[in-house]
Image (tube, grey):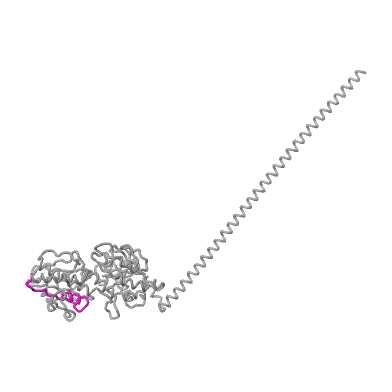
Amino acid sequence: MLVLMLVLVLVLVLVLVLVLVLVLVLVLVLVLVLVLVLVLVLVLVLVLVLVLVLVLVLVLVLVLVLVLVLVLVLVLVLVLVLVLVLVLVLVLVLVLVLVLVLVLVLVLKWEPARLRKMPLPALGTLLTNTMHLWLRSEVKANEHRTALTPEACKELLGEGYTITVERSPEASTKRIYEDSDYEAVGCQLAESQSWPSAPKDAIIVGLKELPEDGSPLEHTHLYFGHCYKNQGGWKDLLKRFHAGNGSLLDMEFLTNDQGRRVAAFGYMAGFAGSFSALDVWCHRKLEGDKPYGALSAYPNEDELLKYSRARIEAAAAKNDGRLPRVLVIGALGRCGNGACDFATRAGIPEANVLRWDMAETKVGGPFNELLDVDIFVNCIYLSQPIPPFITEAMLEKEDRALSVVCDVSCDTSNPHNPIPFANKSTTFDEPTYQVKPKVGGPVDVITIDHLPTLLPKESSDRYCHDLLPSIRELKNMDSNPVWQRAIKLFEEKKALALA
């Protein structure tokens, strides 16, 4: 019985052990199941997180796409707006151009072809009713005159003109009026020789030649061009105007309806030329063969006459009291009148002043009578070929009285120069050169081409007074006959130069 009970106990123990094992196994299984469930939950959570991240990324991408689309739409809208604005601007410009053309055509009396021939200043004035004058400084040595005085500038400024005046600091080319005189009346000052950079519609005003640098001339220039009578270099100068599309209003050829020049330095040129010739004659009587020195400007006529009278009196004393005989050709013109006036005012008797003009020269030269006077002053305006007045061969005469020739006309490079041996220009620094025939003694020749600057103030005042009425009409350049003739002549001469 005991054994049986032990066996039963053992069986119960084993059963209990098996139950415990089974319980443990179940617990383990349950734990594993829980772990798996947890892992699955974690996996699901991760999957959900990834899904959320992907959704967010997609949302961001969509937002960016939408932003880009909006930006592109805005850009396209702006481009369309700009295009529309440009189209409107172009339409407005075209409308304005059409209106402008219609206005110009109406103003020009239905002659639009004339627009092509109008200098830029004329067009500018037509459109704005203003005119810009630019008074340049001179480059020719000893040139002190001016085409516009401060008083004239004051009047023009009062009439609506704009005036720029270049400073003239160099002593050898210093303008007779101070820069401050122009500034005081309201002119704008600019640096010397700055005119190439002036506004293209400004008229550049001067007297003597421009720098000979070959550069194209883009402005309208008002000055003495010395290129319409086949002078040396005339074609080159006119080609410079053509290259720059500029134009020349030559002061020498501004004429009224009667063909007379509206303004000229002629009287003062003859006045100064007569002085120069008489002074050279005096020098030879007083100083013999000693070289004649430089000329310089005088402050006024009174000072010039005072000096000359004393010189003539001293020279006559050394010439046995005999005063020179002076023959002036062109005596009835402005220049000749000035030459004769100076001679008589300086003390030369009227009987010693021979006044020749067309009546005395109509038979044609040469004229042997020129050899019998002491001084010959040529004051003609050469407009066509004529026989010479005197030749170098004629100077070969033992008893010749002629010793001084002053060619005020100074057509030294003109092929029709009536004084063939007066073929090179002299200057204020070297006023004369000598022609030396084998017999009869040397002849002093004066060919200064800007003699009026010997009296710069009187010359400037006289010239500006005569020129001012025409300057006032520059605003009406397209219709004023003086300026229309000047423009037409320029076009004709330019065409010849380009042919």
Tell which residue pokes out farthest to the top in this image: 2
| Rendered image quadrant of residue 395 | bottom left
Start-end of magenta stretch: 318-343
Residue 93 visible in image = yes
Q: Is residue 472 magenta?
A: no
Return the x and y of residue 8 as percentages of the image width and height: 89, 22
| Rendered image quadrant of residue 467 | bottom left
* Residue 293 vs residue 60, the one in the foreground: 293
Return the x and y of residue 363 as percentages of the image width and height: 16, 80
Residue at horizontal 16 percent and vertical 64 percent from the top: 293
Up the image or down, 71 lies above or below 410; here it is above
* Residue 367 vs residue 192, the one in the foreground: 192
Q: How many marks?
A: 0
Residue at horizontal 41 percent and vertical 76 percent from the top: 112
Tell which residue pokes out farthest to the right in this image: 1
For the N terminus, the image quarter is top right
Return the x and y of residue 32 as percentages of the image width and height: 76, 34
Q: Is residue 246 left or right of residue 69?
A: left
Q: Is residue 320 magenta?
A: yes
Return the x and y of residue 52 as percentages of the image width and height: 68, 46
* Residue 125 vs residue 453, the one in the foreground: 453
For the C terminus, the image quarter is bottom left
Residue at horizontal 29 percent and vertical 79 percent from the top: 256
